[in-house]
Image (cartoon, rainbow, N blue to C red):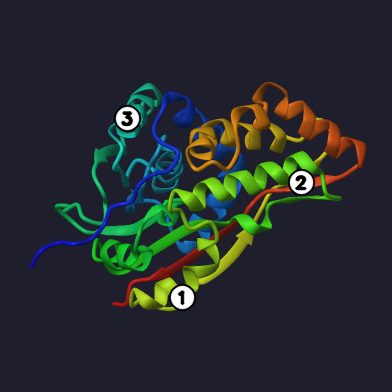
Amino acid sequence: MENTAASPTYALGYSEQELERLSRQAQAFEPFTRQVLVEAGVRAGMRVLDVGCGSGDVAFLAAELVGSGGEVVGADCGSAAVEWATARARSRGARNVKFVLGDPALLKFDQPFDAVVGRLVLMYYPEPADAIRRLAAHIRPGGVIAFQEFDIANARSHPAAPTFDQCVRWIKQGLVAAGARTQLGLELHSMFAEAGLPAPTLRMDGLIGGGPENPAYALVSEVIQTVLPLLERFKIATAAEVDLPTLVQRMRDEVVACKGVTLSPALIGAWSNKPA
């Protein structure tokens, strides 16, 4: 039978700037991802597949949890990402993690995994439920499948800070125009069921902060910088409208002036076990 499954297309690309940005974003989300993996049952000695490894941060976190007796394989469709993550693993002396090129939903592996995990990757699959079904085939009976995905509608400021909220709208519009599903976190429950898995356990996390030292201004500005070519291609916003050189300061000034806070997209985790 012909394989008609469609691989993901990462809308933000694999530039060095983007791979570095992914690692800074990963630092902010690390406590939430760690909690999901621990609650899902990722533990010492396991063999884990990280889907859409990007810069490798989720794989490195999983490698820490499985320890020297376990193994983590990170897979990504972007050769630049695999090379970048491999170089990071080498510099860290991480011997229990490796990275391979390809769509893990379509790759073949020599033995099953105890867990398949991923963060902010299903949102880029054209058919995410089909991807979950295919990925579950790599797991041993009783093994873990765990994903974290965004609900970008949660991202906002309060009281409303116009520049921050405009940036959030631009990011969402750019991603949607490129085919990403910006509220996939809310669909994880139904997609696990559609993939033939038991109903997942769910949890929702997010960043909230205020004041001049709030890291959200820089994090949002970095996403805008990466997504700007999409904004211009789809005629959503121009570089002049965005005004990157002053963007962080404008967001900071507005939020601080109203003694407000910013909220990140909700990071929704879902995990289940493959039926024995």
Please say if the residues under marks 1 and 3 sit with CB atoms less than 8 Å apart: no
Please say if the residues under marks 2 and 3 sit with CB atoms less than 8 Å apart: no
- Indicate whether 260 appears above or below 6: above
Q: Which residue position is annotated with label 3?
A: 80
Label placed on residue 45: none
Q: Which residue position is annotated with label 2?
A: 262
Identify residue type, mark 3. Ala
Q: Between residues 172 and 95, which one lies in front from this camera angle? A: 172
Identify residue type, mark 2. Thr
Residue at x 43%, y 56% (from the top left corner): 42
Please say if the residues under marks 1 and 2 sit with CB atoms less than 8 Å apart: no
Residue at x 56%, y 32% (from the top left corner): 24
Q: Position of residue 166 (x, y in %)?
A: 71, 44
Q: Which residue position is annotated with label 1?
A: 190
Horizontal relation, residue 21 to residue 243: left or right: left
**Disc 1: CA contacts within 10 A as few (<14), some (14-19) or many (>=20):** few
Q: Earlier in the sequence, mark 1 or mark 2?
A: 1
**Residue 57, image quadrant:** top left
Q: Could you tell me which quadrant the C terminus lies in? A: bottom left
What is the C-alpha distance between the residues marked 1 and 2?
Answer: 29 Å
What is the C-alpha distance between the residues marked 1 and 3?
Answer: 33 Å
Task: Answer whether residue 219 is visible to the viewer in this image.
Answer: yes
**Disc 2: CA contacts within 10 A as few (<14), some (14-19) or many (>=20):** many
- Indicate whether 90 appears above or below 216: above
Q: Between residues 51 and 90, which one lies in front from this camera angle? A: 51
